[in-house]
Image (cartoon, coloured by chain):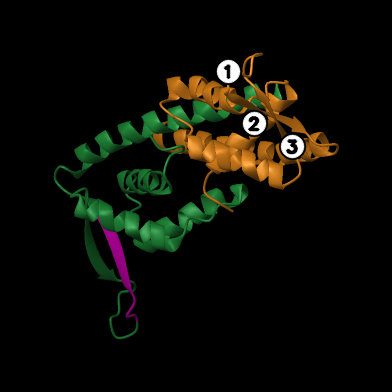
Chain colours: A orange, B green
Amino acid sequence: MAFMISQRAFIKLYLITMVEEHRGYGYEMLEAMKEDFRPFGYVPPQSEVYRALHELVQEGVFYRTKRLKGNDPKVDFQEIVLYHFTDDGAEKAKLYKKQVKTDLDRCLGMLRKAEQDNFA
Amino acid sequence: MAFMISQRAFIKLYLITMVEEHRGYGYEMLEAMKEDFRPFGYVPPQSEVYRALHELVQEGVFYRTKRLKGNDPKVDFQEIVLYHFTDDGAEKAKLYKKQVKTDLDRCLGMLRKAEQDNFA
């Protein structure tokens, strides 16, 4: 058992929840996580977020679509990458979240214990 | 800023508290931590504990003494290593614990947020 929850699992958890909420825009997911954790001084590394997305695609949880950012392809060439659940992706994701919840609870327990044992 | 608190800092925190409580026996500290975290499925690696002790000595927080385990050196050859605070070690340790507390609080905040954001 690892000491603490892995950064990869933590990021995947958020990515799954954002896709559940139909907020599966690649770049926006990264920005949302950065914003979320700014108060904690933690910046999710872009490379980690993209590796996590890649893994979720490899594992058959997500599939990817692309579309142009604007409506006029002559003006706007920027592509937006969108992530969606595959047919059994939502089910797989649910199972994965359950595992991560167990690990989150374990880590919370360890940190709470450390506060009590060392600062009570 | 790292993602989560480091295992090394976590272990040093416990070692300092055990020396504060006059429980500074090298081997027993390792065993106490193992026992403490058994319910969490986490086994503090022996190598990590010894590296943490070594660092605390290097940093001038602890000093080491040795004594024989039993009273009869003809029978009992096993050495016990004991850790104590140096003259300004307790003060240094207090400061270090304060820093670790800040990081513990930060990590607890992140994990609590993750539970709320993804499982509410």
Residue under mark 3: which chain is it in? A
- In the rendered image, residue A46, in percent from the top left (x then y), is placed at 49, 34
Give the magenta part as a residue range: B76-83
Q: Which residue is mark 3?
A: A63
At 52% across and 40% down in the image, what residue appears? Answer: A48
Find residue B55 and report its image quarter.
bottom left
Q: Which residue is mark 1?
A: A76
The three-letter amino acid code for the residue at tag 3 is: Tyr
- In the rendered image, residue B29, in percent from the top left (x then y), is placed at 40, 56
Residue A68's label in the rendered image is none
Using the image, determine if residue B36 lies above or below residue A24: below
Gap between marks 1 and 2, in whole Å?
27 Å
The three-letter amino acid code for the residue at tag 2 is: Leu
- In the rendered image, residue A40, in percent from the top left (x then y), is placed at 44, 24
Q: Which secondary structure class fits the magenta region best? A: strand
Q: Is residue B34 visible?
A: yes
The three-letter amino acid code for the residue at tag 1 is: Asp
At 28% across and 81% down in the image, what residue appears? Answer: B73
Query: Which of B108/A87 is in front?
Result: A87
Query: Which of B14/A16 is in front?
Result: A16
Residue under mark 2: which chain is it in? A
Gap between marks 1 and 3, in whole Å?
24 Å
Using the image, determine if residue A115 lies above or below residue B57: above
Choose the circle earlier in sequence order: 3 or 2: 2
Find residue B76 and report its image quarter.
bottom left
Residue under mark 1: which chain is it in? A
At 44% across and 30% down in the image, what residue appears? Answer: A43
Mark 2 Cα shell of 10 Å, populated few (<14), some (14-19), many (≥20): many
Using the image, determine if residue B14 lies above or below residue B55: above
